[in-house]
Image (spheres, helix red, strand yellow):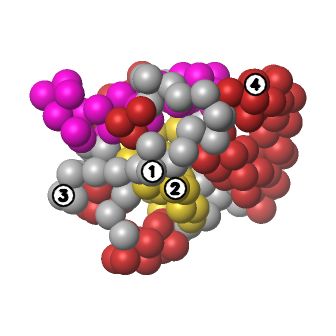
């Protein structure tokens, strides 16, 4: 089990490095455009997003990307931390990993998120069709696999907010 844990850490570092390098230019462009109003996101400024992932690097990257769009970002590295956040705040969207140190994001989505009607965007290293199907059956709104495109994450979060607001009802 220890070897698997080390392997996951190495893979997570590798994925974060790839995503970080690929999206550095995107972050700079977003920062430059921050002052310009974006009509696509104008109704979503100030929305709260809960990011749940055990990779601190990925949390940091996603925080920066989504915060530049005017969102309030909350982060959790475990399901326990995410549960504590949900006791105090109801986010507009949750971006949730599946494999977390203290359990499955799928079970967490089934138990906590779907009952609270919070759209969930799964962001995971699982790329098989069965896991994607399980994610959607658990109440997920979107299923993205790592490595991922930053714009795809932004679109999924915006679409989830639209759904919650009733735009896609």
Task: For label 3, count other residues whose C-alpha is less than 10 Å away and answer few (under 14), some (14-19) or many (20+).
Answer: few
Q: Which residue is mark 3?
A: 115
Q: Say if the magenta span includes residue 155.
A: yes
Residue 29: mark:
4
| Helix, strand or loop at mark 1 | loop
In primary-sequence order, the first of circles 3 and 4 is: 4
| Helix, strand or loop at mark 2 | strand
Residue at point 51% right, 73% down? 81
Task: For label 2, count other residues whose C-alpha is less than 10 Å away and answer few (under 14), some (14-19) or many (20+).
Answer: some
In primary-sequence order, the first of circles 1 and 3 is: 1
The span from disc 4 to disc 2 (Cα, nearest Å) is 20 Å
The span from disc 2 to disc 1 (Cα, nearest Å) is 6 Å
| Helix, strand or loop at mark 4 | helix
Residue 95: mark:
none
- Give percent across and percent down for residue 118: 28, 51
- Give percent across and percent down for residue 145: 56, 29
| Helix, strand or loop at mark 3 | loop
Query: Looking at this rendering, what residue extends furthest in the left direction?
Result: 169
In primary-sequence order, the first of circles 2 and 1 is: 1
Task: For label 4, count other residues whose C-alpha is less than 10 Å away and answer few (under 14), some (14-19) or many (20+).
Answer: few
């Amino acid at each position: 089990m220890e070897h698997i844990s080390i392997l996951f850490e190495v893979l997570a570092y590798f994925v974060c490095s790839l995503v970080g390098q690929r999206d550095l230019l995107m972050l700079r462009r977003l920062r430059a455009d921050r002052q310009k109003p974006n009509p696509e996101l104008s109704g979503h400024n100030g929305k709260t997003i809960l990011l749940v992932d055990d990779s601190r690097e990925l949390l940091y990257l996603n925080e920066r990307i989504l915060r530049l769009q005017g969102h309030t970002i909350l982060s959790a590295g475990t399901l326990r931390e995410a549960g504590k956040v949900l006791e105090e705040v109801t986010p507009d969207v949750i971006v949730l990993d599946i494999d977390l140190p203290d359990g499955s994001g799928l079970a967490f989505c089934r138990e906590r998120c779907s009952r609270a009607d919070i759209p969930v965007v799964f962001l995971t290293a699982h790329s098989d069709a069965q896991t994607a199907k399980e994610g959607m059956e658990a109440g997920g709104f979107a299923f993205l696999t790592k490595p991922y495109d930053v714009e795809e994450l932004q679109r999924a979060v915006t679409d989830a907010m639209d759904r919650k607001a009733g735009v896609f009802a």
